[in-house]
Image (cartoon, rainbow, N blue to C red):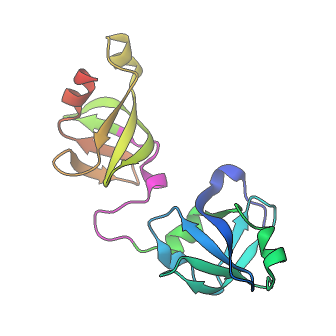
Amino acid sequence: MKQIKKEQLLHIATIGKTVGIHGDMKLHDKSDFPEQFHNGATFFTNLKKDITLSDVNLERGIIKIAGINTIEDAKKYTNAKLFTTREKTRENCHLEEGEYFWFDLEDCDVYEDGKLLGRVHDIERIAITNYLNIKTDTKLIESGSAKSFLVPFQEPFKVSVDIDKKIINLSGAIDILEAS
């Protein structure tokens, strides 16, 4: 595979301990898209080696790495992190209407009623709810607002999202900022 910059890679899973004696391993999926783990799927690792999956059993959370057939060889991959690119994620993962990849939401400017509140720094999942972690606009910080705040990324807070323009319009976010 061609050279990819580290910041372009997405950590999507970690390989766990070995299972059985033939090189099967536990897969800890850290994504919302299990469909990307299938026979023949190739991923980058933090071990500076690309791996290809074979014998994927998502119901049991077990994978086998192509060419690895012994427990000794498999143990070399314990705790290896699996990475993919944004482009491969877009190709391999299906979104429903109104759903977005987290990496598309990051760096979006956040507005309420035309007023810039800040920029999405990160997305956090708390229980079953995704929250936009917003770094507050400098002008608001200077007037006494918190440096950052969390807003649930769901209705009634989410009004509109324009990924191409990197703009998210919210409702009720000013109240959350003022209470932060």
What is the magenta range?
A: 95-109
Query: Residue 88 placed where, x, y %?
Result: 58, 70
- Predominant SS of the magenta segment: loop
Q: Is residue 47 above or below residue 39?
A: above
Residue 143 is left or right of residue 89, and the answer is left
Residue 97 part of the magenta-drawn span = yes
Residue 24 part of the magenta-drawn span = no
Residue sticking out furthest to the top: 143
- Looking at the rendered image, the quarter that the N terminus falls into is bottom right
Asked whether residue 68 appears in the rendered view, the answer is: yes
Residue 98 is left or right of residue 164, and the answer is left
Front position in the image: 120 or 116: 120
Q: Is residue 162 above or below residue 1?
A: above
Query: Residue 11 placed where, x, y %?
Result: 60, 58
Q: Residue at x 59, y 71 (%)?
A: 27
- Looking at the rendered image, the quarter that the C terminus falls into is top left
Q: Residue at x 36, y 42 (%)?
A: 132
Q: Residue at x 81, y 61 (%)?
A: 48
Query: Residue 168 placed where, x, y %?
Result: 31, 45
Residue sticking out furthest to the front: 20
Asked whether residue 1 appears in the rendered view, the answer is: no
Q: Is residue 109 above or below residue 87?
A: above
Residue 156 is left or right of residue 60, and the answer is left
Q: Residue at x 33, y 36 (%)?
A: 150
Indicate the quadrant where residue 178 lies: top left
Query: Residue 4 placed where, x, y %?
Result: 73, 59
Front position in the image: 125 or 21: 21
Count of picture labels: 0
Indicate the quadrant where residue 37 lies: bottom right
